[in-house]
Amino acid sequence: MTPHPRIAEVTQRIAERSADTRSAYLERMRAAAAEGPARSGLGCTNLAHGFAACSPGDKLALGHSAKPNIAIVSAYNDMLSAHQPLADYPALLKEAVGEAGGVAQFAGGVPAMCDGITQGRAGMELSLFSRDVIAMATAVALSHDMFDGALMLGVCDKIVPGLLIGSLSFGHLPVAFVPAGPMPSGLPNKEKAGIRQRFAEGKADRAELLQAESAAYHAPGTCTFYGTANSNQMLMEVMGLHLPGASFEQPGSGLRTALTAAAGRAVTGLTALGERYTPISEVVDERAVVNAVVALLATGGSTNHTLHLVAVAQAAGIELTWDDFAALSEVVPLLARMYPNGAADVNRFHEAGGMAYLIGRLLDSGLLHEDVATVAGAGLDRYRRRPALGADGLIWDEEPEESTDTTVLRGTDDPFSADGGLRMVRGSLGRAVVKVSAVEPEHHVVEAPARVFDSQARLQEAFSAGELDGDVVAVVRFQGPRANGMPELHKLTPPLGVLQDRGHKVALVTDGRMSGASGKVPAAIHVSPEAAAGGPLARVRDGDLVRLDASAGVLEVRGADDLDERPAAEPAADSAAGTGRELFAAFRQAVGPAERGAGVFGALR
């Protein structure tokens, strides 16, 4: 299928814009690969340290560079339900790699925090920065010159982007990502959200809320709503870094175990010691990056990836911009409805046809590049087929021709929406991202007086005191990466939802994040430049008339001709306090703007 003209146009534009940085990156990676197995150049003392704990047979193989050595890097901890299944993966992967003729060593662990636990807490200020810490920890794990390939074990939020950025710094190695899968469906997400809103109104007590939350988040595996964690899994598959169909198979099943073992065997066959050498630097190219953006739009995925994909692309020498997201969103239809964009969860999406159906329909419409490298082999076409356990083991032979539930998953001939539901807005307040796929059309345009807050806690206090009971654009500032690490602001969704349900015109404007769980209230997020960097948000006052028009792409203060001359506000003194915050002072000083991926590495280029 010939690529859609817009897909071809945006891909070409990215390639031209990135020509110098991409060429420099590939030159570095190819130079590293040309040296052969790095451990062959290690001194005897170095090498002895590297395989001291191995079996005698593995020592012999590694000492003579006869077998590929595969690094295992894991984000395992058993506090995160999504990562708890990873506990058993290293032993399984070592066995599978051995069967494929290689050796596997556990190379290192990376930190993995849960945004669901830290929501509204000081710890949330460390969340986005943890992505760059994870990237550095991944690079530390791979830095020993012992490895010919790598397996990355991680699922959630900042963890997968961090693992990917770190992997790309060792881009001469083949790398496969190994997921854990979602937990079984529990209390429907819409019911959970309803109880949260009742609690915000004082109509439900803490015991009722905790019971509902515990019924929603109740087992090992990823949370079942379509937030950043599950968007991560979708992206790894469409970028060719998962095996086909691996993203949403639940933990503990025979198929999940078979897919995990197959990932170990697959990456062993992709090293420079074999005949199918496929380094991750060649997998993550301009076409794969465009495929990622298209799939994100087609599924209504997490707005966090307007940061993460930009940062990932930079790590591969590719310059991706918010304008690219906006241009692609105009032609990519919305094919999936998962909470918060609908009632279904990722398990229903998977059952309806899942990634195989989605990728097949996008390929048929020319909306994905088929001619890409993947860990499963050349071409994305193989990702049309779903895995199954046959008489002789794992097979891929089923290509779903129809969705079994068109309330959850549809083809391009009957989409939920003609566009991807992600809008870029700009004006006198800067640039921002708006996710409209979960917002009813009548709420796409809001013009109302501003109420300005320097923290989400202050907004919640005003709501509880009855100060917010009319049309309002809530401006929550000093929430950007330089100010406090750019925490997610999900605690704002229930009170703002209450105001909207009362019939008021309500919107949120913030330099913070809302991510994949963004709800029904229109929100202009990731405002750039942020208030702490002197952005216009620092000069907005209570009562200013703010207009957010997601349809026309406008974010502005109306009738404030003196906005640029006003003195910039300073954050409240108590907003600077946060446990662990001093450890991340260097990140706050060096971090780049949201539209550049809100990372340290991109800011240094």
Image (tube, rainbow, N blue to C red):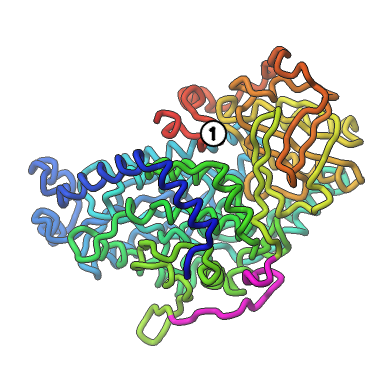
Q: What range is drawn magenta here?
A: 397-415
Image quarter of the C terminus: top left
> Which residue is drawn at the image coordinates 16% and 51% (left, top)?
37
- Residue 206 in percent (x, y) is at 78, 46
**x%, y% of residue 514?**
66, 42
105 to 463, vertically: above or below: below
**Dot 1 corresponds to which residue?**
126
Residue located at (31% from left, 66% from top)? 266
Principal secondary structure, stretch drawn in magenta: loop
- The quadrant in which residue 226 appears is bottom right
Q: Nearer the viewer, residue 8 or 325?
A: 8
Total marks in image: 1
Q: Position of residue 495 (x, y in %)?
A: 81, 41
Q: Quadrant of residue 383?
A: bottom left
| Point 55% across, 73% down: residue | 357
Magenta-span inclusion, residue 38: no
Residue 205 visible in the snapshot: yes
Q: Position of residue 356 (x, y in %)?
A: 52, 72
413 on left or right of 495 = left
